[in-house]
Amino acid sequence: MSLLVVGLSHRSAPVSVLERAALHVDAQVKLLQDTVAAEPATEAAVLATCNRIELYADVDKFHAGVADLSTLLAQHSGVGLEELTPYLYVHYEDRAVHHLFSVACGLDSMVVGEGQILGQIKDSLARAQELHTAGRLLNDLFQQALRVGKRAHSETGIDRAGQSLVTFGLEQLALGAEVSDWARGKKALVIGAGSMSSLAAATLARVGIAEIAVANRTADRAERLAEILNEGGDVSAHAVPMGSVPDELTRADVVVSCTGATGLVLSAETVAAARGWVAQPGADEVPASSGSGAAPAPRLSASSATDENCPLDLAPMQATAGFSVLGEAAVAGMAASELEQHAAWVDNAPRPQSSGPAVTVLDPAEEADAIAALAATAAVIGRVPERRRPEPVAEMPRPTPSLFLLDLAMPRDIDAAVHRLGGVRLVDIESLAEASADAPMAADVDQVRRIVADEVAAFGAALRAAHITPTVVALRTMAADVVANEIARLDGRLPGLDDKQRGEITQTVRRVVDKLLHAPTVRVKQLAAEPGGAGYADALRTLFDLDPETVAAVSRAEDSTTDEKDRGSS
């Protein structure tokens, strides 16, 4: 049997794909059950976080295992296999061990060194144990990953290299200011009361937020979190029902949201209405009377984009800061047929002539191809995606933010369109990924990588040595049976032996057998622990003509003992 992991993360897939592929608890349970029911897999565990979805399994066939695990991920995530496949990665045997150990140490996190992943790994193992989908291999693997992660944090300064996603998000909201200075005296709304939301609330209290309102679908959990925050004495916290979120938005300076909702928790319209902001047709939404003193965002003229022969009604559409009416923002939501007509119009339209300053004009064929590609996308997913930050047509100043939103959920809780509201700053998983890509790596990261490499080698050696143990046990059992049979035959041939003589003969024969087996069994364990040593177990079984079923029975007995021990410790 062999360890296999198939997954996707913020390193391999865009946030939009991760968002759609997110697995909630019920989907994870069903995925685990279906995985162990599939022919190539005997064990399974799912590691699903806000920026990764990974399926671990013990398989007997590599190619069949990859195919089955990929198909199962696609089925349970709801993203088609053809669309999901380009973003999947596969790790096998030692590479799979190395990957999980790196994840446990925070080396593969969006914010390098963050320690929250250890709790998520622990939860994944507990779920697999509860469902009895984790056997000896995955129990050992995940427990060792937890130990490696703790070792990395205790023996190195990896914590200095990274921080929690919450802290990093707050730093992005603060725009370079000291977080404690930025947060001092502000009022916050925390939506959700799970582990990430609780961490966010505690972090907000620590950095100086004056008041925190906690909203959650389960009122008891919100009240409990508020009680815990109040016990700290540094912040005033209270629970509010989810239905009061729009009212709380009118008072909040900072909003942090991380729920398990499948749809949006905060829409752009809700945020705009709560703050008394109105949407200007075709322009950035600007404060009507926010009281913040922020200047309204200026409009851009769209006259250059209008033409009476264009099949799209672009005349009433004015460009927004950071958006082009000739780009995705203009055609977002249009039907594929309309886009195709627009492509044809662009191809045949007269190009602007000007004797003034030079203007940039796209090649007609290139522009038509781009819009045709958008039409193809619309035909597949039913709409045209509007990028949050398309190529800007002009650098326009934005009002100073008066509302700060941090979305830590996957799929997202807060409508990405709120970033177009003047006076709002939104930081979400996608923008955190972009910001963390440029974050400097600490020197301690190299030390953690060495720890991971050493631990992977040790785990592989132990795994290979354990693989041969049932064969060695079966060999010694066979030898003991041979000794017992020969002593019985001796009793028949020499019935006059007294108990002392029989005992001496028995001990002598056993010592001879033990001495003959000692060197080869010790040496074969050493050889089996080395890379490529898996074949020694087969050689031992062949040389001594061991019954495969006897070896399998020993292995099952060991697995049963291990399972009982794991259940007792979990």
Image: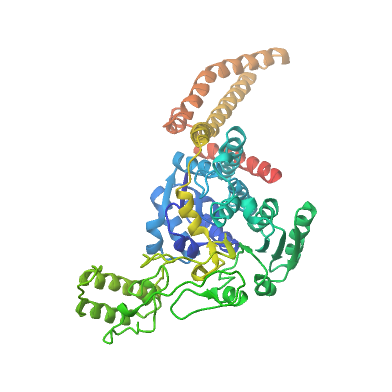
Q: Residue at 47% x, 67% y: name it.
A: 78
**Residue 313: image location, x then y, percent:** 35, 85
Q: Name the one closer to the observer, 406 or 105.
A: 406
**Residue 347: image location, x then y, percent:** 21, 76
Q: Residue at 27% x, 82% y: name it.
A: 341
Question: Relative to residue 540, is residue 556 depicted above or below?
Answer: below
Q: Name the one closer to the observer, 337 or 210.
A: 210
Q: Is residue 544 visible?
A: no
Question: Relative to residue 152, is residue 289 depicted above or below?
Answer: below
Q: Name the one closer to the observer, 468 or 349.
A: 349
Residue extending farthest to the bottom is 308
Q: Is residue 51 visible?
A: yes
**Residue 104: image location, x then y, percent:** 55, 43
**Residue 520: image location, x then y, percent:** 49, 21
In the drawing, does residue 378 fall left or right of residue 168? left
How are the colours assigned in the image? rainbow
Q: Name the one closer to the observer, 317 or 89.
A: 317
Q: Residue at 58% x, 48% y: name it.
A: 117
Question: Relative to residue 194, is residue 544 depicted above or below?
Answer: above
